[in-house]
Image (cartoon, rainbow, N blue to C red):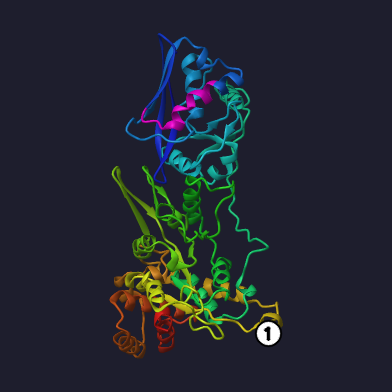
Amino acid sequence: MSFSKVYSAQNHLLKAHLVSVETDLSRGLHSFSVVGLPDKAVEEARDRVSAALKNSGYKSPRSSSQKIVISLAPADLKKEGPSFDLPIALGYLLAEGLTVFETEGRMFAGELSLDGDIRPIRGCLSIARLAKRLGFLELYVPKANEREAALIDGIQIYGVETLHELIEHLEHVHSHTASRLAPAQKTQVHNPVADDELTIDDIIGQESAKRGLMIAAAGGHNIALWGPPGTGKTMLAKALSSILPPLSFEDSLIVTEIHSAAGLLDGSIVTRPPIRSPHHTASYVSLVGGGTIPRPGEITLAHKGVLFLDEFPEFDRKVIETLRQPLEDRIVSVSRAKGTAHFPAHFILIAAMNPCPCGNRGVRGKVCVCAAKDIARYERRLSGPIVDRIDMWIEVSKIDHDKLIKRSRTSHESETAKEMIYRARRKQSDRFGSTDKPNMLNSEMSARDIGALINIDPEAEKILNQASKTYDLSARGYHRVLRLARTIADLSDKDHITREHILEALQYRQKYAVQ
């Protein structure tokens, strides 16, 4: 036999695509070429595969006096990364007649080390989902990726440690003798909570900010915390994860898939909403995503979780303005000459900032040293459209020092908040269950949804209309107040939006610059 075909997959824009690894051997001067738009890592597979085969006790392609051509089809899809090492090695052994096994119904992916060990790869979950969708019966992946791939039902997942172990298993199955490997058990998803996780119980005072976090967690609203340095803005943002509900199984798969494609998994499954906190010096591409073949950035890595931007006005203006699309449409588009990629970006934004560059403006006992032009420039970093997309603006003021010591540490605010958030989300689930988006949160409601699903008392509607004229709210701002009031009402277990809910929602629309 001088030809073989083995199946593998290529991750591209967070999705896996089927790739056929075809091997052809012919007489002639020795050569070993890989075709099908391979990148440098794929081309270097020739050396890794040759050494791995030799050190595993098989004939190396380097010692062959044949012309070896490896074709990765389809040829118009760019092939990246080392995940084709394993199928290339198997394809060569089949074409050379050094092993025999059935390739149909089986998919292979893995990087080979020079001694024949199989190293982990990125995007294994996406490959497993593709294999199941295309009807493959078995998927062979590195042992380190086994638990991740085993999240998918309906396909047998085999975690393999060495090339020699895999070939022995395939040959035993082909000859109907006892197999050497057992398929992985389906991965059970748990929601562990770290013992050292920061909770709102650890934060002294700041009751209005804690209330804002509860509302944000219940309805998926964006929130801005502003105040002088050292008042707990960062602690509040980090504590939000302690009151957010765990991810649903489907959301857990999506988030794990994104982090797997980015190479950020450590063998565990993402079951808690991710919290991403990039530094304000982070580049545009690192936050938004990009590259010749676009890859996701921090905005996408925060999908179904929290994006915390500390020192918000210090971010590059270009980065801040890019938030317009994901905050409105829940996606981020990255356009390049070769096409446009659309990445999911459904997150809660927490922005933290100081009242001025030095942080002391309006602080009792402190002197602001900023010039008027510096303050004006600092405030102009946030454009009107960005300010309008943030639902809540909450001041985080200084705490008296005597309260830092006297306060009891037996608070159960976190548990109470989680119970209220759970009930509020159940009300939203009941409300949107009959729509085409049953898992929608209040912050995601369209204008049509607001008109059809929000029940507001006449007095509350009158107050909202009067306030909209007074504060000159935009149409977007008007709808955001309604969404916010709906969440406040859900936290109070009320079916109708009342006067109190509207007044509280309007209170959060005050921007720090006008204080």
Q: Quadrant of the N terminus?
A: top left
Q: Which residues are magenta?
A: 36-50
Is residue 40 inside the magenta stretch? yes
As displayed, is residue 476 above or below residue 129? Answer: below
Q: Residue at x 48, y 41 (%)?
A: 128
User: Which image quadrant is residue 510 in?
Assistant: bottom left
As displayed, is residue 268 above or below residue 100? Answer: below
Q: Residue furthest bottom?
A: 459
User: Which image quadrant is residue 158 in?
Assistant: top right
As displayed, is residue 382 above or below residue 493? Answer: above
Q: Residue 236 versus residue 435: which sits nearer the camera? A: 236
Report x, y in % for residue 62.
Answer: 51, 15
Is residue 5 inside the magenta stretch? no
Q: Is residue 116 visible?
A: yes
Q: Main secondary structure of the magenta part?
A: helix
Residue under label 1: 402
Side of 81 relative to 166 (left or right): left
User: Which image quadrant is residue 466 in?
Assistant: bottom left
Categorize mark 1 by other alpha carbons within 10 Å: few (<14), some (14-19), many (20+).
few
What's the amino acid at mark 1? Asp
Q: Is residue 7 visible?
A: no
Q: Residue 109 versus residue 82: which sits nearer the camera? A: 82
Secondary element under disc 1, as helix, strand or loop, is: helix
Q: Residue 23 versus residue 46: which sits nearer the camera? A: 46
Q: Quadrant of the C terminus?
A: bottom left
